[in-house]
Image (spheres, grey):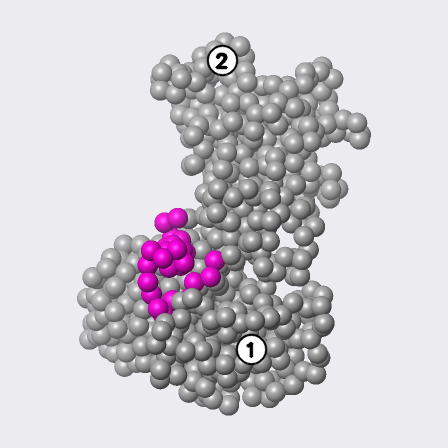
Amino acid sequence: MQTETRPKNYPKLKSYQPTRFMLATSHYDRKKADKAVNFIEQLCHTKSKWAGHRFWLLPWQEQIIRDVFGIVNGDGTRQFRTAFVEIPKKNGKSELAAAIALYLLYADGEASPEVYGAASDRQQASIVFDVARRMVEQNKALMKRSKIMTAQKRLVNYHNAGYYQVLSAEVNCVLPQTSVLMLDGTEKPAEEVRAGDILAAYNGFQYVGDKVVSVEEQKESDVLEIVTVDGMRIGVTGFHPFWCVCSGGFDWVCASELKPGDWIVRAEKQESGMPVIRLAEVEEVRGIGKKRTISIEMEKYQTHVTNGFITHNTKHGLNVSGLVFDELHSLPTRALYDVLTKGASDARQNPLAFIITTAGTDKNSIGYEVHMKAKDILEGRRVDPTFYPVIYGIEDGDDFGNEKNWYKANPSLDITIPVERMRDAYRDAKDNPAEENLFRQLRLDQWVASTVRWIPEHIYEQGSLPIDMEALEGRECYGGLDLSSSGDITAFVLCFPPRNAEEKYIILPFMWVPEDTIPLRVRRASVPYDVWVQQGYMLATKGNVIDYGFIEAFIDELGKKYHIKEIAFDRWGAVEMVQHLEGEGFTVIPFGQGYKDMSPATKAFYELLMKGDIIHGGHPVLKWMAGNVVIDTDPAGNIKPTKKASPEKIDGIVAAIMALDRCIRHEEQGSVYDERELFVI
């Protein structure tokens, strides 16, 4: 046990009062509450300056623990079977969630407890588990009775035959084109499987029919490709389980844990219905990037055959005694939530689902649905005596710049969160709509739209200084090429980096549109394409589709006038033009349009605009596009322009961001190939 004493100036709950949601037929059992509090306060923090120090509960945390574990029915079971805690980031939610998971595993008195940590993806689901693992490693009493299986994200308590296991929405997800075996012996791509189809399930001896309950498309996930020595291959998410040869027999092993030399089970279909079981040796496990995936839910057996491999849906058949659900707001569909909360704990006498999350951006999600349930209970519009609601956040009408509201939303402010960090974040958010959205969502727990108009006009206008075109001739610059579909706008932007501390970035945009489409565009959108073409701000190519040959020749001429060192391009539909540009001697660099590539450059572009460090000469087409840009934000705070949500064209801004990225990378790294290799066709 830890001997450290509580610091004198560390906040503590002074006078506990049970929640107003305690029923008249329930009572507060102080002994049970003290047991939970004392267990948690024997654990140690795992991060930053608190690492290694005892986990002294803050007042808001202790209130939750005493309410959830101390308020019981007449038979001694907990009144609250679900606890929902919504709170901004950095208030200590991961540590609290990990401590609760450990209490449910080691001290709750449940026989053979099954505690699950769940989230939208493997990485998020692992955050709380890794905190719990480190807490156990720092506690000798717990470590004595535990086995930590880090690779499998599993923590076993030998003392009561229980375990804590990580799950995610990515379980049993395959690529859409993966073949799935039907009971009649035919095969379908996973994306063509429908609810009600009868698949060939493997019951350990033979194929039997099992009905498909649902087929859901998941968000893009990191996908692994498993390649066997005999040439079989399958693309799956890291949590996708395979039936494998293990010491002492067979077991389910997640794809991310497979390694060359492992043996996995294949089942070859036969007309008799009795499968021929064969073993396949794993030759390689490799990442193939983020891909769209499909999840198939079965009615009974939860096994099916994909690309000849027996796979299993590990989310079903669970006997949940405890559930810790992290960041519910980012769950792409409700399937995992429903599986874990609807009937999975019916066989347990005293189950608990502890849901802890920040606010999100999708008001059609299960996260928002549960948020609204909690809010309705808090405001008296709904009653559920088994549901414990806690929401720390600001209301829509609250001033997000008022520091009193910061303390209202962040009960750990000035303890785990220095107020100066909040002030720094607020300064970034004041003049930047995208940063304001993030500040409201992540730091004040306010549900916001995932998209936001990005560039205020007064900020963009700072770059409307005249450009000395003659002075640019012969200077080094970098290009960004955003190709359109054949009938739309194509944009090419050159970015000239500053040569000294007094100079600014200069961008020159070039736009093309099919000539025959201009009248229709003007009528439909009331946008003066015709005027811009007459004024020379936009170039028209003959016909009703873009003439890529014309654009290639134009860029070639620009290359004679300016020293174009690199051209970044969107991979989509650009192969032929890239080949031609390479043939003309240009260095071309592929530039992804996802968060990974776009977010750093997008943030840098806005920061430089705010400082007045980008000069665009007031180009009217680029100004129009800047006013159209809507930013999309992911749960991690990454941003990118979104063409889908933007009300009109933004191609020039996207091309400018790509060009700026190459400038900055060249300035910071010296070698342009440190991050990306030369694109080879």
Q: Dot 2 corresponds to which residue?
A: 533
Nearer-the-camera pick, 355 or 535:
355
Residue 274 location in percent, x, y?
Answer: 24, 77
The residue type indicated by label 1 comes to: Val
Could you tell whether 455 is left or right of 293 in the image?
Answer: right
In what quadrant of the picture does the N terminus appear?
bottom right
Q: Which residue is painted at 45% across and 15% down in the image?
A: 528
The residue type indicated by label 2 comes to: Val
The image quadrant of residue 681 is: top right
Q: Nearer the viewer, mark 1 or mark 2?
A: 1
Could you tell whether 288 is left or right of 374 in the image?
Answer: right
Q: CA distance from mark 1 to mark 2?
A: 71 Å
Could you tell whether 230 is left or right of 592 in the image?
Answer: left
Nearer-the-camera pick, 447 or 194:
447
Question: Compared with residue 465, is residue 305 higher up or lower down, i.e. above or below?
Answer: below
Could you tell whether 65 is left or right of 526 in the image?
Answer: right
Q: Residues within 10 Å of mark 1 (few under 14, many from 20)?
A: many
Residue 312 appearing in the image: no
Nearer-the-camera pick, 538 or 55:
55
Q: Dot 1 corresponds to which residue?
A: 37
Question: Compared with residue 423, is residue 267 higher up or lower down, i.e. above or below?
Answer: below
Question: Element under label 1?
Answer: helix
Residue 325 location in percent, x, y?
Answer: 45, 66
Residue 361 location in percent, x, y?
Answer: 45, 48
Q: Which residues are magenta?
A: 363-391
Do the CB atoms of the residues marked 1 and 2 lie less than 8 Å apart?
no
Question: Element under label 2?
Answer: helix
